[in-house]
Structure formats: C-alpha cells, structure tokens
Image (cartoon, coloured by chain):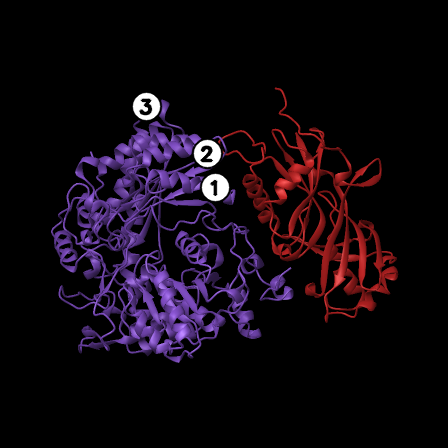
Amino acid sequence: MYDLALTEELLLKIEKPVRYIGNEVNMVRKDPEKVDIRFAMCFPDVYEIGMSHLGMQIIYDMLNRREDVYCERVFSPWTDLDKEMRIDRIPLFALESQDPVFMFDFMAITIQYEMCYTNILQMLDLAGIGIYAKDRREDAPFVIGGGPCTYNPEPLADFFDMFYIGEGETVYYQMMDLYKEHKAAGGSRADFLKKAAQIPGIYVPSLYEVTYHEDGTIRSFVPKIPEAPATVLKQVQMDLDHTFYPKKQLVPYLKVTQDRCVLEIQRGCIRGCRFCQAGMIYRPLRERSLAMMTDVADAALESTGNDEISLSSLSSSDYSQLPGLCNYLIDHYRKKNVNISLPSLRIDAFSLDVMSKVQDVRKSSLTFAPEAGTQRMRDVINKGLTQEMIRHGATEAFKGGWNKVKLYFMMGLPTETEEDMKGIAHLAETIAMDYYQLPSEYRHGRVSVGASCSFFVPKPFTPFQWAQMCEMEEYQHRAHIVNDEFKKQHNHRSLSFKWHDSKTTVVEGILARGDRRLSKVIYDVYKKGCIYDAWTEYFNYDAWMEAMEENGLDYHFYTTRPRDLDEIFPWDFIDIGVTKAFLKREWNKAMAGEVTPNCREKCSGCGAARFGGGVCFESKSKVD
Amino acid sequence: MKARVKWTKTGVLKFIGHLDVQRYFHKAIMRAGLPVSFSKGMSPHQIMSFAAPLGIGMTSEAEYVDITFDWCYSGQEMLDRMNAQMNEGISVTEFRQIDKKTKSCMAQTAAADYLVTFRKAHYFVEAFTKRVEPFYFQEEIRILKKTKRSEKEVDISPMILEIRPQGDEAIFMKLQAGSEQNLKPQTVMEAFCNYLGYDYDPAGFMYHRLETYLKEDGKLLPLGAIGREVTEPVGPEEE
C-alpha cells in the first residue's frame, strides 16, 4: 500500500473517501523524481463532476504521453474534508502521487462555469501558494486557467498567472518545452511570464493595464510591455482526426455523473443560436471521421469495461457520419449489452428509428429544446425550430410508443413579451392535445409533457452580449406568469413546469460579463466562507450582494444596464475568429426578428473561416 | 454455469463501498472479455450476486460473489484473466462451479470471522485483550439499536458465537451474519467499550474479515467449501 495524503482516521470520518485515494484503473503511474515537469490538472468541483469531463481526460492523456511530464489530477475537496484540511493544515494534494500541489511546476485549473469561481480560490488557498498571483513566491507553481470561462477571464484576472485561450490540444507542448528551457536557464517568474505571453493563445493578465471611464465602462485595455500582444487569438485544433484522444480512459470507483465512455464526434456548431456561447467560441464546426470514432469507441469500451457509450457534441444531428456511427455502435455493441446514449439529437424519422433500437421506448422520454414559446421569440434567438417541426416530431414519437416528452425553455430573453411567456404553456398544451387526438391504438396511458425553464444569462462573444438582464424579482414574476398559464390549460394534469433559481442567474450574470474589479468581490465572497456556489445547498446570494456593495459596485452595472454597441468589453482583447462586426449584425437582426441561415445553408461571413478549415471549407457537393 | 468466486479486499481499496465494488466487478469482467451471462429484457444486467456487504474501511480475505457465465475457461484461467484486470487491493482467489439451484451466497451466509486490531494511540490494548472473557460471559450484552423509526434495546450475546484474544494485539470473533441475523464487529466493539467504561471511537479499531460461512446440517462451512473445482473449460449448456 502506498502512502496517502490523508490518514485513515480522517478518511473514515469523511463522506466518500474514495474521492481522495486515486488508484483507479488506467491511472498513469510515474516516478515524480524522474520527470522534469509536474503538472497538476485541477477541476474546481467535486470528484464525481470533474471525472465526468472529457476535456480533462484528453489533457491528462496528452501530457502524460510525454516522458518528461507527469500530469496528475486534483479536485475540490468536498466541504467536510475542506474543514478538516484547514484545521489540520493539510495542503491540497494530487490524486496520483498524493503529493502536495505546492511542489508542482504548474497548477492548471479548468474553468467550466462561473459558479465555480469560489472553488478556484478554495484550491489556491488550500494549496498554500497564495490566492493572489502577485503574492506568489518565485518557486510557486504557475497557475494557468483554461476552458470556456476564459473567454472572459477578467473577473479572475488577479488570481491567475496566465490564461490559455483555446483548445487544449494546441500549445501545451510548446509551453512545456519553453518551461524546461526556462527552468534550465534559471530565469525568474516574471521572465517566464513574459516569454509565455508570446505563445499564441496565452494571456498574462498582469501584463495589461485597464483604465475606466467615469461611468465604469472601459476606456482602454492595453499591454504594459511590447512582449504582450494587444489581442490574443483563440487557438483551435483544426484537424480533429490526427490529434490526441484518450484510448485508455480512467475508470473511477465512484459512480460519477457521466459513468460512461464519451465520443466527441465534432466540435463547434453550425446553428448560430444567438444566446449560445459554445456555438460561437468553438466555431468553425469540425467533424471527426467515422473511422476515428469507431476506433476510439472500440478502444475506450475495451479499456474501461463501461456498459454505456454516449455521443457528445452541440448538435449531434448535424454530424454527417451519424447514421454510419449509430449503425456501427448498434451492430457491434447492442449484442454485448452496451447501452448507447444519443443526446442532443433532433427528433425526426431517423433519430426515432435509432432510438427505438437503443432504448426502452416505454420508459424513456424524448427531449426537445424549443428554447422559447412563440415563433416570434424563436426567430429573435435564431432557433431554427418551428412549432410544426416540434409537433410533427412529437407525434411521430407518440406513434412510435413514447409518451413522455421533455421541453427545455429559457425565459428573460431579449424582447420577451407576456405572450412569449404564455406561449411556453400553450406549446406544451398543443403537444398534449396532439397526443390525445391520436387514434387510441397509438396511445398508452396519459401523456407527460414536462417543461423546464432556465433564465437567460447573456454571455460574452454572443450576439446577445449587449442584452439587458432582468431583476431577480422579475424572473420570479415571469416564472409565475407561465406557471399560472400552465394551470389554466385543459390538459394541465398531463403537464408540468419547473424553473431554475433566479438568484443564481443574477450572480452568474454578474460574473459572465464582469471585469477585473470583480476579483476583489470574488475574494471577499470566498473569505465570507462561500464555496460550492454551483450547489444550491451552499449558494449564498446575500454574501455576493454584500460583497458587491462593500466594494462599491452596483450589480446593475453588470446585469440590467443597456450597453452601447461601441462599448469596449472586458473580453474584447480576445479574438475568437468570429468578429464583433458579425455579432453586431446578429444583434441587430435579432432586434428585427430576422433569422440567419445555418453554416451549411449559407455562409454568413462570421469570420471563423480565417482558421482555414471545418465547415467553412466543406465542398458544397458533400452536403446534399 | 454458475461459479462461486472468492475474493479479497485489502489496502486502499478498503475505502470503496459495496455498490462501487459491484460496479468495479462488472467493469473488470467486461474488460477481461469473459462470457458473463446477462438477464433478459430491455436493460440487461450481469447475473451476479454478492455475499454480505463489507463496510467502508474494512478489509477482508474471504469475500464471495456468485457469477453466472454462458461458458468458462478452467478455473485457474478464469482467475488469471480476472486478476489481470484487477487493481492492487482486490484479487480473486478461488473459482468453483456450484449447482444452479444452490441458494445465492448472500442467502446462504450464516456467520463470519473477524479479526479486530487496534490503531495506535487510541486505546490501551491490554484493557481489552485481558477482559474479553468477563465481557463475553455477561448474562446479557445489551445495546441500543437505532432504526429509522425507533430505538430499542437488544441483547447481542446470542449472536456472538465466539470471541477470544488473539495474541496480545488482537481480538478474534465469530459472529452471526447474513440476512436473518447480522451482527457487525463494530457493534461488538462498541458494546465492549461501554462495558469497559470507554467512549467508543470508531477510528480506534481496524476490522478484517477472515472467513464467511454457510450453515449445513448445523455445521458452519466456508461459503467456498461447496461445489467443485473447475479443472477443464465448461461449455455452454444445451437448451
């Protein structure tokens, strides 16, 4: 038995000790003495969430392929262990070697959602390396952030030495080489940051100066030294077939959120929904080949023994190899009793046929994401889904034996009217009516139409980055309008309506479009004892509001304020390929209720073609 | 064919709970590519049934699971193929064919042996080892049993089949186990602490299961004592 960072007494005292012992099947074992670089890959949430994340497994595999690097995993200790570590002064440790993270060369933190920001501070604090980047000693690990929230890293600017803007596969090897050189030459921390700032996609926040207008908006955002680029270009892995993909995925002991193999079939999305950040920042759409996906599926299932495999993408129906891949998985794995899970599929004849083969029709439910209740609203958000398409899909599904339907909506979208809100209830009712009007041989008991609603949070690099949010009370009010309308429906007993917490929405909204001044707020919230904000039982809205006030900041500045079309945003120094001019055009079209065709129908000149590949260069003959 | 497989749980894997162990076996068998049988229906699952669950933190050298296979290699080869997929801490040690009609190992479980050792710096060991007899020979050993709805006092002494010091450092006990009457070694140590006038500190003791038994004609036999060795591969059954 190897040495654990925690004593047995402690492990027996806390919930799910297996979160902290590592030792899983396919864990990479190296002698830390024999590598040049120790890299701590950190996920600022609990083990079960972090281990469900494919991106982390890709980087883990990619870095560990290098003999000179040992990449290990670190997750947020759960609240019970968090307390014990503070009392006993146990430093944050990595699962593989169980060594303290402060010994490492890099502490890389993936930033997947705004509500994990206090957990980032928890990790830095427990690691004992200084929460603020400026307080870090010469020998402290370099703290680098990656992931979707780095597309506006500014609220976290004070805590990170660097951010990496782009997809993980592209520049980490270059960074490792640079670091080895630097370590051998014995340069200072500042020297390395200066050099790292010249790697494409790397942003070193301390090398930039921000000035503000009197109204709080940004006057200027400029590099302090010539080595730091004025704009940081997002890095993209254009060829997704000849790149890293973990064939031996880790097999957790615990039942993690995604207890299955994951096939990432493509990156990006052609749809252009105006609220969707992923749909913009991951442009252009790039597919992986069928041959690669079947290879990965075989290897991943064999090396894990998982009994389920799932496709992953923003819109699986747009994957050109979908029929081939589905047929392959069904032919090879159904008889081996492997479950096949197909999320984010458009409901049509093909998908219903495939789904009827892979799941129990009577037990499973079908999911639609109309996002809005009326056609007017769906045109504003550019959701190319009509009521006819939804009704047709649902009716076909009912005929195929399904009788459970889930509908996803957003409220608080720009220009939303009372009619749009009530339309949510009406759409659900229409679908239920369609069911009850089917001939009786198609009906199996009562239909169940469940609508679930989140509140819209405007995100950077979307056409809606200029949108105004609502007050917290207004979200509640709107949810009640919809709820009341549901109760008025004839088939209301077949319908259900749920909505998300509006307080979380407000805080998420503050952070999503926040600036550097919020670093102090996040710090203060953390010091008030907040962690795990993404978990409703720990989220403390009042602490956030207090901290805003104590720092002299009005949250309306970040949420409900109208933004000028020419305002300099905190994230404008990042170039995602998609231009601000395109986003403005899309915002104006949204206000006019005009739709934009998807990338395969017609190129709208968003700018992503500069990356030289993907859907932008698909020959039109390939697409019918 | 139905097999009874004996396995051990040691080292850091003692922190893995029962449900996680089940999932671990399912995946190990899939990785090994062994012809495990599946139940019929829309959501088929491996036909596998575990004996008495081991609590988190306990180690064991005598756990059992019954697994049904469509066919199998020789017992030794089955063990080798399974062990090749096991992490340090869990390994399979016996593979025997049992009759299809044999009750599941869980249903058969009647008793288990445990070795309790003392973690340093919690208790004075001799206080326990020297007083096992008077503790055991009390007329009754009453403990407060808490369930979700109520609390009641029960006498656990009839469920302690044997208890004695083992050397100077450990206590051996044979306790009733299984679905009818189940006594945990932790409960015994808690009662022992009460008897000695100490607070019960769960971290003070380490629990190790030595054997799990079934009862046949009034005699206790290890769960793995029945059935037969598999020296040759066993083909699929004819329908």
Question: In the rendered view, does A4 fall on the left or right side of B75?
Answer: left
| Rendered residue at 36%/61% (across/down) | A172
Q: Earlier in the sequence, mark 1 or mark 3?
A: 1
Q: Position of residue B105 (x, y in %)?
A: 70, 39
Judge whether B110 appears above or below A183 on screen: above
- Residue A530 visible, this angle: no
| Rendered residue at 44%/67% (across/down) | A531
- Residue receiving disc 3: A439
Question: In the rendered view, does A90 fall on the left or right side of A484?
Answer: right
Closest to the observer, A5 or A495:
A5
- Residue receiving disc 2: A333
Residue A301, label in figure: 1
Q: Chain of mark 2?
A: A
Q: Chain of mark 3?
A: A
Dividing the picture into quarters, in which one does residue A440 lie?
top left
Q: Nearer the viewer, mark 2 or mark 3?
A: 2
- As drawn, which residue projects farthest toward the top? B239
Dividing the picture into quarters, in which one does residue A536 lie?
bottom left
Q: Are marks 1 and 2 in contact (CB under 8 Å)?
A: yes
Label 2 to label 3, Cα distance in Å?
36 Å
Label 1 to label 3, Cα distance in Å?
43 Å
Q: Amino acid at mark 2?
A: Tyr
Residue A112, label in figure: none
Query: Regarding mark 2 in the picture, which secondary structure is present there?
Result: helix
